[in-house]
Image (spheres, rainbow, N blue to C red):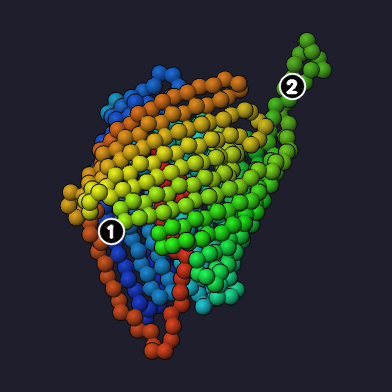
Amino acid sequence: MRSSPVIALLFLCLVFGGAEGDAADWSIVPSVTQKTEFTSNLNYSYTAPVSDCIFSLAPAAEFNYTTDISQLQARLGLTGIHYLNNSQLDHIDQNYQINGRYQVAPRWGLTLKSAYIDDSTLEQEFVTSGTIMTRTPRQSIQAGPGVTYSLTELLAATVNYNFNQVHYQDPRFQNYLTQGVGLNLTQQLKNEKTMLIGNIQAQETSYPAEDDLFRVLGFQLGGKHQFSPDCQVTLLGGINLWFMDTQTQVQGLSQYPYFISARQVKLQSSEVTPFVDLSATRSWTNLSVSGGYSRNQYPSGNGGIQDLNRIYGALKYEFTERLSAGLSAYYSLSDQISNQYSYQNDFFGINPIVTYQLTEELTISPGYQFGLREETTGGSSYSAKVQTAWLMLTYTRLSVTGEKKPTTPVGTQPATTPGWEKPGVLGGPPFQLH
């Protein structure tokens, strides 16, 4: 499993690398981050919180390869984590991501997003479903190939397929598999500042251990508008139609009080839920601000679909070329949409951080986080607090680059590849749970 991302990267270099005569620019940016942190509550536990010092070392490399008709981006990263007082939790996290785009013809293009993430820090489950689990390894395999066709110069259609398989080491959590297809339409208006967006998505999530099945058909409309080079707003709204086949236990009372039987019955139900995605960014000379609100439904390790509301905001101020400070805040409300059991999870966090560039390649970043978690299950409420302080040292090697001059014949125009997105944590908000 660990060698498969490297093999895939080499394969995609051949597929998306372009022809020998195309212009090619490439870069490799290696880095290593050492982080020392203290947390007052390792797992956001409601009772008997456990504190610890955590040491981590994270080498990584980002790769970019671009030609006139293709682009390939990849990130390969490892994080070795050691707990001072709970060494049984020691783990090597992995994060491999490979994204590509290839222009087959002036109107036709291929895209790919893929990732393998092995995470044990609570973060991936939190950004995916808004729920907080123990520091047990969570493995996720994601793949999303797509085909794009330009109907006109301003109108493009993309058909994509999404695959996501999640496995938990802790048997208290349930593995699941998600597959889906989608149609995306984007219409660029003539003012070149507004883009209209429409999405239709069909998805199926299965929990093999419980024989539960969740299907959804989603419709989204909205757009993106750039008021100025420093100000942009995106708004999408819609509905999701859910169809659920879940197992429930029914008690038989025909022979009561002598005997009470129990049997599993498949329960079929449906529900309509809203979809909202609002985000905005604004920047000035030294200050940048971003924020947003979203509501959508996601599978989780709890064995059901979570209805997740997110509100977040972040700002960054650059005092000098070397010194900057940031502040982010995040609130989420996660609730089960099925009727299996009552569960609600609230989380609030605030995170100030200071960054100072010691040299051109070395950066030091002290930070702090306060988190508050509240859970309501079956009419009972619980709460937990956590405080975390850390110090990070990051060494980033100046990128190794190479360039090959174009050999395109005079009078011809190379195909364009608009809309590339840099790799990152798939689906994650701009806030990290430490």
65 is higher (above) or lower (below) than 1:
below
Q: Tag on residue 29? A: 1
Q: Position of residue 99 (x, y in %)?
A: 43, 60
Q: Position of residue 243 (x, y in %)?
A: 70, 43
Q: Tag on residue 405? A: none
Q: Residues within 10 Å of mark 2 (few under 14, many from 20)?
A: few
378 is higher (above) or lower (below) than 324:
above
Q: Number of numbered discs present?
A: 2
Residue pictured at 50% horizontal, 27% vertical: 374
393 is higher (above) or lower (below) than 131:
below
Residue pictured at 68% horizontal, 36% vertical: 246
Residue pictured at 43% horizontal, 80% vertical: 414
Q: Position of residue 282 (x, y in %)?
A: 41, 54
* Secondary structure state at the residue bearing disc 2: strand
Mark positioned earlier in the residue sequence (2 or 1) = 1
Q: Residues within 10 Å of mark 1 (few under 14, many from 20)?
A: some
Residue 209 shows in this picture: no
Q: Which residue is mark 2?
A: 251
* Residue lying furthest top: 257
